[in-house]
Amino acid sequence: MSDPKIIVALDYPGAAPALALAHRLSPELCRLKVGKELFTATGPALLEKLMKSGFEIFLDLKFHDIPNTTAQACKAAASLGVWMINVHALGGRKMLEAAQLAVSTCAQPPKLIAVTLLTSMNQQDISDLGINATPGEMVLRLAKLAQDSGLDGVVCSAMETALLRRHCGSKFSLVTPGIRPLEASLDDQSRVMTPEEALMAGSSYLVIGRPITRAVDPLQALLDINSQIRGL
Ligand SMILES: O=c1ccn([C@@H]2O[C@H](COP(=O)(O)O)[C@@H](O)[C@H]2O)c(=O)[nH]1
């Protein structure tokens, strides 16, 4: 089976545009991400349709709550048959361990990863929270916590990928949004890298939304990026 590196973020308000795009793409070229907007609008029914078309799904709901609530939410998400789910590392060790335990008891456990520091955030945003650390220091600390808690990987920016590869090893999944091809608009992202830079630094998977979904020809945009990263 192929292991496409690109995860296309289906950030749409409803099922119709998401399915229209999915029908133009193919599971050999990409995986798909369903996030808060689309899942809140459509629920599990859309996931079933996408999975029937052969796509592996990253269900990006970023659970962050007390341990019991997060664990039960992870169990419910895992039962949907998706490839990967996530929680916020800032929920802390007890929450992460509870989530991991809940997922591990499922018949077909999805990958479980933790969001470290959102790729939209920069040094000023961290300082505003009263945290005295650089993005790299904060991401490393949260990634180690996620790894110690038994998770499969983290969401980070590709700017931290090389650092995390050194400290967390080659098997830890590093899933990186904030990917922007050269000359693409940054939109609301702060810590960004190009697809080639991210994979050369050691990213496992690249989450890409608007540079593909808002392209005049989304399939061509995906094919272009796949050809830029071929062999990396
Ligand atoms: O730190 C994070 C965590 C999640 N995301 C999600 O990834 C995509 C990125 O979309 P673009 O259009 O390529 O900016 C989006 O669904 C976010 O919710 C993230 O960007 N950063």
Image (cartoon, helix red, strand yellow):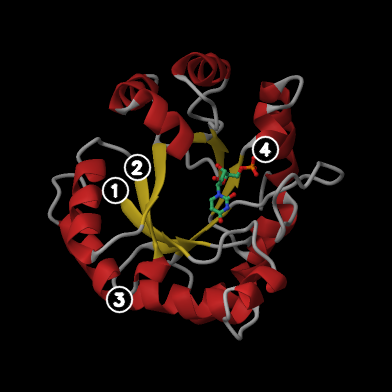
| For marks 1 and 4 on the same chain, the one whose residue lies earlier in the sequence | 1
- Alpha carbon distance from label 3 to label 1: 20 Å
Amino acid of disc 1: Pro
- Alpha carbon distance from label 2 to label 4: 21 Å
* Residue at x 62%, y 58% (from the top left corner): 119
Neighbours of disc 3 within 10 Å: few (<14), some (14-19), many (20+)? some
Q: Which mark is residue 12?
A: none
| For marks 4 and 3 on the same chain, the one whose residue lies earlier in the sequence | 3
Q: 211 or 219, which lies in front?
A: 211
Q: Is residue 212 above or below residue 104?
A: above
- Alpha carbon distance from label 1 to label 4: 25 Å
**Is 113 placed left or right of 135 in the picture?**
left
* Residue at x 49%, y 66% (from the top left corner): 116
Q: Which mark is residue 93?
A: 3
The picture quadrant where one finds residue 68 is: bottom left
- Alpha carbon distance from label 4 to label 3: 37 Å
| For marks 2 and 3 on the same chain, the one whose residue lies earlier in the sequence | 2
Q: Which mark is residue 83?
A: 2
**Is 183 placed left or right of 64 in the picture?**
right
Residue holding disc 4: 226
Q: Position of residue 231 (x, y in %)?
A: 66, 49
Q: Is residue 189 above or below residue 21?
A: below
Residue furthest bottom as drawn: 132
The reply to whether the C-beta atoms of the residues labelled 1 and 4 are less than 8 Å apart is no
The reply to whether the C-beta atoms of the residues labelled 1 and 2 are less than 8 Å apart is yes
Residue holding disc 1: 110
Q: Nearer the viewer, mark 4 or mark 3?
A: 3
